[in-house]
Amino acid sequence: MRITEDFSTILLAAGKGTRMKSPLPKVLHPVAGWPMISRVIDALNEVGARQIRVVVGHGEELVRQVVEPLGASAYKQDQQLGTGHAVQCAEPQSLQGTVLIMNGDHPLIEANDLRFMIKEFVNSQRKLSVVTAKVKKPGSFGRIVRHHGELKAIVEAKDASHETLKINEINTGMYLVEAKFLNKLLPLLKNNNSQKEFYLTDIVSLAAEEGESVGTILSPSRVAFGVNSQVELAKATKYIFKRKAKQLMEQGVMIMDPDNTYIEDDVKIGAGTVVYPGNCLRAGTKIGKMCIIEPNSYLYKAQVSDAVHIKSQCYFEEVKIETKAVIGPFARLRPGTIIGQEAKVGNFVEMKKVNFGAGAKASHLAYLGDAVIGDETNIGCGTITVNYAFDKKKYVTKVGKNVFVGSDTQLIAPIEIGDNSFIAAGSTITKSIPAGSMAVARGRQVTKENYKPKAPQNNEVKEEVKKPNVEIEG
Ligand code: UD1
Ligand code: CA
């Protein structure tokens, strides 16, 4: 839900992310399937940020490609001279009203957190507030230094005294500030600190010097959670997957082991469905009610109706599965495949762009590509639609209703098999078959009774057996 308060955002994302030790710009590392910065932007869009300005530097082009389609605009920081300098690069002179400044590497932020802090700030009628959190291990966070309860300064861990380091109230890196006041303070920043950087945090002491009382908004420690390393990235991912599993369980989904189930944010699952461990349910997947999803399947943009049984170890991409179908184990369904109601797809069956009829069966070892398979048709073990021709084009196979395709049949496309027909096992079918026919296309069997193999002739060359020429040193 959008909030009524009007605000703009400056999102800092120009840093290199050295500690990630990865060629990917830090803010693009995926947290449970989505680049961390898009999680932040999604939350901002949800509450209705008027403008989102992202400060980019390292990996500029890649970051732009992710943030611009989400409605944010990118501002370049050529040299990373510190967080204060980064804010200046976002051209804050052209902003008005409330400005929210935050980091692009805090992926656990939720729309509700933003709603809370913006409301608090607007109600406080202050010119500047810092979002703080109390944490057990304040580590490298900037420390909130108070005097008689009033915020006086933020001291970076690298510049802090032994005593200051003990403070466990920290700066989350989020600030709410009146645009005019921000523009008054920014030119006053200096880089006389241990890192020779223009610290944004210094706007707090500058404001205090101006006689302006600076507010703090205490938020949950989750808000402070920033990703600086692969270990923190994995922690954030785990958090998001567990949050999703919990939401689904609250809606009546049975998740056997939420610690080992990987369901992305936009996945929908109906009540009464059981999800076994090891499943990776990716973006765009929708699963109906009363389904069983056995362990270790990968589903991407799969639309699964009610009461479907997916046995262990399946791989589905962009497929649709109708009610009561039974699939797997070890089935691979590729884009454009639709599995009809109560159909059965067994182990080691691969399908691509197949419309597989209601009640149809392919129980074992088959490849079906670019095909339409009629209702109640049985596809025997080892059947192959030969869809890819010498001219590098794909051709369609149409099999009617209630057809029996014997085991080890090759259907050379383009081809049509009429309803109620029967193909004998081991056939290579090259011509279409009318409805109600029987077709067999294989070499005739030759049987020689009482057969004795011929003895070898004298003039046959015997293969010389060579001794291996290997000497073993003692
Ligand atoms: C910063 C705060 C610290 C706070 C912490 C919360 C400062 C000086 N310190 O420290 O008080 O506790 O965040 O996570 O602000 N960035 C740029 N350009 C730069 C430098 C940084 O865009 O020149 C971006 C980074 O990409 C990152 C964010 O600013 O998204 C924070 O920078 P980082 O170097 O991670 O600051 P911290 O040391 O974490
Ligand atoms: Ca950081």
Image (cartoon, rainbow, N blue to C red):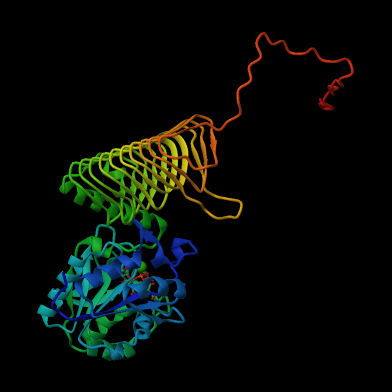
Q: Residue at x 48, y 61 (%)?
A: 21
On the question of residue 417 being in view, the answer is: yes
Closer to the camera, 149 or 358? Answer: 358
The quarter of the picture where the N terminus appears is bottom left
Residue at 42% of width from left, 82% of height from top?
76
Q: Quadrant of residue 27?
A: bottom left
- Going by the image, does 307 lie left or right of 446? left
Residue at image location 83% in from the left, 22% down from the top: 465
The picture places residue 164, in percent across and down from the top left corner, at 28, 68
Whole-percent x and y of residue 449?
65, 11
Q: Where does the image place residue 348, in percent across and percent down from the top left?
A: 45, 36
Q: Is residue 168 among the parts visible in the rendering?
A: no
Give the residue at the far right of this rendering: 459
Q: Viewer-proximal residue, 322 or 68?
A: 322
Q: Nearer the viewer, residue 359 or 297?
A: 359
Residue 60 lies in quadrant: bottom left
Q: How many marks?
A: 0
The C terminus - image quarter: top right
